[in-house]
Amino acid sequence: MRDVLLVAIREIRQITATKGFWIMLMALPVAIAVSGFASSAFAPEDSTAYTVVDETGTIGEGITERLALRDRQQELRDLAEYAERYDLQAIDPQAPWADRQAWLSEAEVRRFAEAGGAEAAVERIAPDLPAGVPPFELEDPSYVAVPLPDGVALTAANGEMGSALQAAFENDIAVDGRTLPYGAVLYIPQNFGEPGAAARVYTNGRSNQTLIQAFRDGLDGALRDRMFAAQGIAPATAQAIEGMAAPLAVIDPPPGSGRTEVMTRSLVPLALVYLLLITAVTTGSMMLQGVVEERSNKLFESVLACIRPDALMQGKLLGLGAVGIVIVLVWAGTGLAGAMYFEGFAAEVVKPSLAALDDPLLIAAMIFYFFAGYIVLAMLFLAIGAVSESMQDAQSYLTPAILLVMIPVMILMQAAIGSPNSPVVQVLSWVPLYTPFAMLARLATGVATWEILGTIALMVAFIWIELKLLGRIFRASLLNDGKPTLKRIASWVRSPGRQS
Amino acid sequence: MPASALAFEAVTKQFGTLTAVDDLSFAVPEGSVFGFLGGNGAGKTTSLRMALDILTPTAGRIDVLGQPPSRENAAAIGFLPEERGLYKKMSVLDTIVYFGRLKRMEAGAAKASAMALLERLGLADRAKAPIEKLSKGMAQKVQVATALVNSPGLLMLDEPFSGLDPVNQAMLEDLIADAAKGGATVIFSTHVMQHAERLCDRLLLLARGTKRFEGTLDEARGALPFRLVLAARGDPAGLPGVMKATRTGGDGDWGEYAVEMADGAAPEGLLAHCTANGVALNRFDVHRPSLHEAFIHFVGSDPATPAGEAAR
Ligand SMILES: Nc1ncnc2c1ncn2[C@@H]1O[C@H](COP(=O)(O)OP(=O)(O)OP(=O)(O)O)[C@@H](O)[C@H]1O
Ligand SMILES: [Mg+2]
């Protein structure tokens, strides 16, 4: 054990002395910081202010209403998902939010809005909220209508933007004590609809697609109404035609239920799969280089005169594992810190993900799969290093090995997200090389407990066997002057003897 | 005979169909300096590797410091492999300390011993330099230091002199002699007979895996007849101990003769006889066989094959 530690410490020092290690270690934190600052600097606030200047006096109101309804629709959708997840539909079975499909129907959304929207629904739920269920988080509306700021004129005549408006766009706008970005102004001329009389949208130059789309829908609707009227169609009929929508049901996976299955909708396991691949492949390559160097230098002989080949191999694995842990901890730590610090996108993804991780078995399984996967891959790299004479030689083994790992894992990730119970995923869960990836990916959507325990047992057995085999390859190849051919490698694996 | 630090008993090592070491038996007495001589491919390196448990013998028994080969002995052994190599990025000091630690030394002791060795090898000012910044010879001295750092009781050096300049070869000879004076057993393999002649108490001559000779330097030379050249007034054929005398030159009465002596007859005896009996001589050259000649005699080929290191 002492030998194993000595070797491990030397490996750690060697790896941490490389630039590559530090670049990799800092890559994620830097990326988080950059994207965090970038998104807090450039991303729009939750709400964007806009103005409709309507000289016709009829169209503008519809557009404002339409935008408000969109927010309500989103609210209803979130609320219904929340209600289903925590089994709250029984509190008010008639409410629009008790039905997960309700947001698809404009009538239901209107009913929801008239009943007071999410605010009223939250109040309704509050007294009956079971213990342990977090309250629904209300979100700010996406768009807030504001009057044209004082002293700002639209130089509507020539269509160019006046400097006062430009300044208003640049300076954001104060609404109810909050400062919101001022997104766009819609100008509808008196004679809108007549040839040559176009509505105009002045924007602050940032991407306001939804807003502009809403303007456009409103204007289109107004034109259609006029046309209907001109054709003598009654307003009620016209509305019915406009409100017509193809019957549509959207089937989502049920949000976390957690009775017979261990499940989380957490992103954490999926993130771990990528983290696993990246760290294992990069640190593995570093170690591979080290092993090839030792081999081509005939360095092993001096070392092997002092310690057993097994101790050397285990020391290398341990060192590599420790480096991996450090990288993962630093990444996870900065990820969390970033999520806490930047109250933007990261917080919205990371916080709920972590909140969903409440089952100790799940957490333990995740950690196990991660390290089991890491060790399995590390051993693969070590084996390649042990049978390679030079880096070129290693490359010729490495490429097929990486493909062997990557391609099924990529397929698996796709499958696991789309249809977690498809046969591919089920089968790969029980193929040791892919077990950690498959199971991590599946944890995101739910796996039976027996499968978790079974695959853990499988992995333990596999790692034990792999260690033995690798020990043999190591012993045989390090001490053999000859070039390791496939045939010889096979014979090393088969016989516990030391030479071919 | 003192106990042996290393003993081979009928050891055979086969690589597939090739027999690298064939039924080899020898013993290295404790405290001796033991030379392992043999041409390329004779099996020297293979034998040392077996003694270190890096290779396992196909048959036979090996005893190292009274035990079968194992890493249990690592703390008492210093080994310099034939193919040199060190971690390129590691510093000189760290490298030596690392090997000291692998040989069960405490960090402090390893460091102190490493610094002392570097001092002695003239590399103290390079202690912090990474190995890749050293010349080949310097790196080799560092590797010698990794073998010596634990003050081993048994030192095995596989061709320790190759790659060193004459000054450093002399320095290494001193190191080996000092280790032996300190009571260590030293085994080294070489192609260069001069080193063996200067250092060894005992020798083993190997050829194609088999033992051709084991014994002291004098025994090795004594196994070959010496050459005697003398210039005498008459034919020396009748003198005691002379088997055959061939005239090779000279003029008139004075002839130059190459003399072959009978087994066991010493040239000193002949000289004494001549002086005592007034046999007129004006030259009496005894040419003792060198180890080189003994090597060729036993091994049947010149040690300095093209692939060898003996060209220096
Ligand atoms: N790992 C191995 N696999 C196969 N054959 C080997 C192996 N190691 C050594 N041999 C063979 O064993 C024989 C003895 O080799 P060894 O290295 O012991 O010779 P040596 O006396 O050290 O020679 P040199 O003076 O050239 O170093 C050689 O014929 C060599 O080809
Ligand atoms: Mg050799």
Image (cartoon, rainbow, N blue to C red):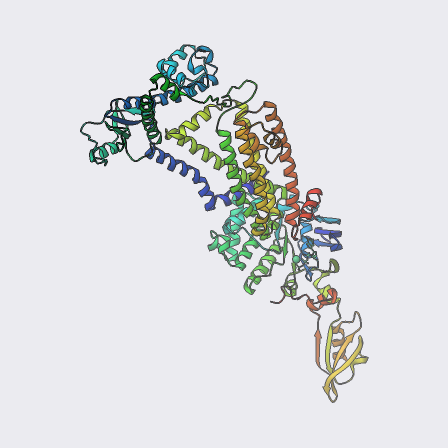
Q: Which corner quadrant holds the N terminus of chain B?
A: bottom right
Q: Residue at x 43, y 28 (%)?
A: A349
Q: Is residue A16 above or below residue A464?
A: below
Q: Nearer the viewer, residue B210 or A445?
A: A445
Number of numbered markers? 0
Q: Residue at x 35, y 32 (%)?
A: A209
Using the rendered image of the protein, determine whether residue A308 is visible from the camera's viewpoint: no
Q: Nearer the viewer, residue A364 or A476?
A: A364
Residue farthest toward the left in the current orientation of the protein: A151
Residue farthest toward the front in the current orientation of the protein: A231
Q: Nearer the viewer, residue B8 or B83?
A: B83
Q: Nearer the viewer, residue A332 or B162?
A: A332
Ligand 2 lies in quarter: bottom right
Give x and y (percent) for residue B63.
71, 48
Q: Which corner quadrant holds the C terminus of chain B?
A: bottom right
Give x and y (percent) for residue A367.
53, 30
Q: Residue at x 73, y 57 (%)?
A: B209
Q: Is residue B215 above or below residue A467?
A: below
Give x and y (percent) for residue A346.
41, 30
Would you say B105 lies left or right of A234 here?
A: right
Would you say A117 lies left or right of A324 here?
A: left
